[in-house]
Image (spheres, helix red, strand yellow):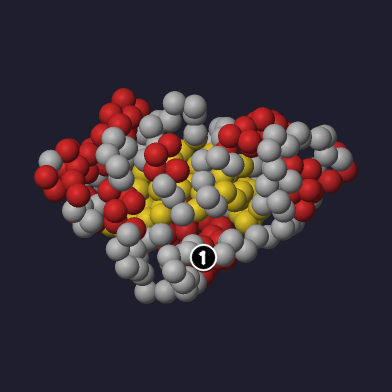
């Protein structure tokens, strides 16, 4: 299963969510988090890891005869302290975009080929999606796309403007709201957007996932980790549902049901509910 995690504006915590999903993935499977953000990766600096293997070495290998090897992605992973496998993106945007151009040039990316293998899940941290993002082929080939946004006026306005286009990027577009702001139900009703879940602002939990935590407090003990576990379980259940005759699994379970529409307009939400952070 290939899961693309991205945003439409700002930095609402795409890398943190992608890492949290990988760290709290259910079952025995150890997923792979791949930094394919065209603006550059964060995990290398956060964990003080070497720059290779990573996305750049993966792109170099993909140019050669080994490019069609379904195990190629695994060969370019490193492990975070908790054991999560990651493919590190380069810090610089120029290197990141060059590597992504190579990885997206073939009929299928190494990420897609890896997930075509049994019991393999790849979580792609695609960063902020711009019109010319070289990560688009990865997003379009994903089995599910999570659009991450803070439930604030400015970010939701951008969501409304780009909603019609975003619904063409993926067969399974879903939103994840991050932090305080408008209640989940109100966002879903106003924008008519399917919302999979909500992640609280949890600085301590984010610090643990970013390698800055102290003591024995792991991601399973934090509010962020618990919220990510619920989303991961939903995605896992979707990816492991039996299907017949090559059909895809049913739609993902959403926190608030809603039918996607074309060009939904954002209507002002009541200020009296703006601080209702509970879904």
Image-based side of 54 in relation to 184, left or right: left
Does 97 appear above or below 32?
Answer: above
Q: Quadrant of the C terminus?
A: bottom right
Does 22 appear above or below 271?
Answer: below
Residue 74 horizontal/vertical position (percent): 24, 56
Residue 102 horizontal/vertical position (percent): 26, 34
Q: Can I make out residue 278 in this image?
A: yes
Q: Residue at x 59, y 42 (%)?
A: 167
Question: Between 21 and 234, which is closer to the camera in this rendering?
Answer: 234
Does 125 appear above or below 115?
Answer: above
Q: Residue at x 76, y 34 (%)?
A: 266
Residue that extends furthest to the left in the rendered view of this protein: 65
**Circle 1 residues within 10 Å: few <14, some 14–19, many ≥20:** some
Q: For mark 1, what is the residue?
A: 249
Q: Quadrant of residue 150?
A: top right
* Number of numbered markers: 1
Image-based side of 242 in relation to 57, left or right: right
Q: Quadrant of residue 84?
A: bottom left
Image-based side of 184 in relation to 176, left or right: right
Q: Quadrant of the N terminus?
A: bottom left
Q: Residue at x 77, y 53 (%)?
A: 185
Question: SS class of the residue under badge 1?
Answer: loop
Residue 79 horizontal/vertical position (percent): 28, 57
Q: Can I make out residue 77 in this image?
A: no
Residue 252 horizontal/vertical position (percent): 58, 61
């Amino acid at each position: 299963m290939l899961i693309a995690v991205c945003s439409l504006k700002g930095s609402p915590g795409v890398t943190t969510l992608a890492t949290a999903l990988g760290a709290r993935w259910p079952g025995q499977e150890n997923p792979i988090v791949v930094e394919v953000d065209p603006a550059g990766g964060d995990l290398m600096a956060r964990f003080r890891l070497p720059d290779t293997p990573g996305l750049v070495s993966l792109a170099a290998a993909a140019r050669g005869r080994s490019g069609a090897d379904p195990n190629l992605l695994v060969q370019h992973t490193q492990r975070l302290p908790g054991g999560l496998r990651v493919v590190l993106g380069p810090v610089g945007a120029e290197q990141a975009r060059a590597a992504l151009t190579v990885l997206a040039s073939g009929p299928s990316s190494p990420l897609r080929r890896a997930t075509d293998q049994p019991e393999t899940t790849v979580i792609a941290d695609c960063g902020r999606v711009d019109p010319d993002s070289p990560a688009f082929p990865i997003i379009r080939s994903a089995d599910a796309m999570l659009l991450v946004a803070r439930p604030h006026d400015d970010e939701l306005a951008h969501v409304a403007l780009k909603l019609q286009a975003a619904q063409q990027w993926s067969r399974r577009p879903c939103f994840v709201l991050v932090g305080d702001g408008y209640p989940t139900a109100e966002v879903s009703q106003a924008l008519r957007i399917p919302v999979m879940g909500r992640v609280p602002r949890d600085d301590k939990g984010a610090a643990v996932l970013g390698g800055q935590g102290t003591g024995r407090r792991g991601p399973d003990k934090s509010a962020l980790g618990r919220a990510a576990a619920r989303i991961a379980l939903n995605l896992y259940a979707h990816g492991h549902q039996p299907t017949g005759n090559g059909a895809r699994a049913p739609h993902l379970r959403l926190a608030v049901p809603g039918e996607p529409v074309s060009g939904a307009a954002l209507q002002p939400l009541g200020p009296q509910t703006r601080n209702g952070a509970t879904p």
